[in-house]
Image (cartoon, rainbow, N blue to C red):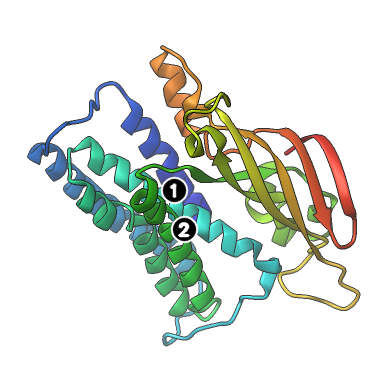
Amino acid sequence: MKRFIVIFLIFSASNLIAQHSFWKKSDTLDLKKRKTLVIGGSSAYVLSMVGINQLWYAGFDRSSLHSVDDNQEWLQMDKFGHIMTSYYVGKVGMELLDWAGESRKNQLIYGASLGFVFLSTVEMFDGYSKEWGFSFGDIAANASGTGLLIGQELLWKEQRIQLKYSFHQTRFAKQNPELLGENFIENTLKDYNGQTYWLSANIWSFKKESKFPKWLNIAFGYGAENMITANVTPNDNRFRQYYLGLDVDLTKIKTKSKFLKTVFSAVNFIKIPAPTISYSPEEKFKIYAFYF
């Protein structure tokens, strides 16, 4: 949860700033802008690390660097959270370097890797805390998010497939509110039963001569249910869920309003409620008029 909160706020704030008309993109390298990014980014990184350490880790005992195997927890839903945050923080890093007029090569090397660097630093904090531990699974998930971002830029020079998130409240949070959250905001961050992570592919971008609406996406989702604790317990009946549905790429909706462009870009990580088909071994196929 701590990773998701901090990085999500950074993503939202950076996205809003980058879209502001004052921050007009430079066609060539602007040394003043790059200097601003280096100083501002370095300061934000140091302050965020100090803040995370004081607010989250200071109250727990330290230990020597150690690792834990948490790959079976939450049916890997937490790993998808790592993938998504690594992807979007890297995307913000690329966009900010693009704003400064940096070369495409440097955008990929220094911008797209920002999510991996940030999350992996937090992972080191886990490794020196008795309460948690360094997770190689988390590192692999961080790398996957960064790889998805860089891979598409190298292959298509654009993000045709985006990671998205949706959430609905479930009955499970009331059974363990300390772990799954006591209110709606906490539920969105803690209750993996209600979270769904999506790969949302823009149809038009794969066939640009087609008549498909430019904003129409098809999305493939993953979720899990019946989880009260991180690990399997006696009489546990947790199961995975798979989804296929429609989605909208808000950034491809035509509008002359700079305000709407900013809003659409900032919230485009959210999967739009749409007709969806789900499948799980326990519930078989289900059809939703609008799933979120």
Q: Could you classify mark 2 by the number of other residues whose Cα lies within 10 Å: few (under 14), some (14-19), or many (20 or more)?
A: many
Look at mark 1 in the image and give the residue it sits on: 88
What residue do we see at 36% from left, 44% from top?
92
**Residue 201, labelled with which disc?**
none
Numbered marks: total: 2
Secondary structure under tag 1 reads helix
The answer to whether residue 183 shows anywhere in this view is: no
The front one of 139 and 285 is 285
Amino acid type at image mark 1: Tyr
Secondary structure under tag 2 reads helix
Q: Position of residue 269 (x, y in %)?
A: 53, 40
Figure quadrant of residue 230: bottom right
Q: Position of residue 104 (x, y in %)?
A: 23, 47
- State the separation of the CA atoms marked 1 and 2: 8 Å
What residue do we see at 20% from left, 52% from top?
106
**Residue 145, labelled with which disc?**
2
Q: Position of residue 222 (x, y in %)?
A: 69, 55
Q: Is residue 165 above or below residue 284?
A: above
Which of marks 2 and 1 precedes in the sequence? 1
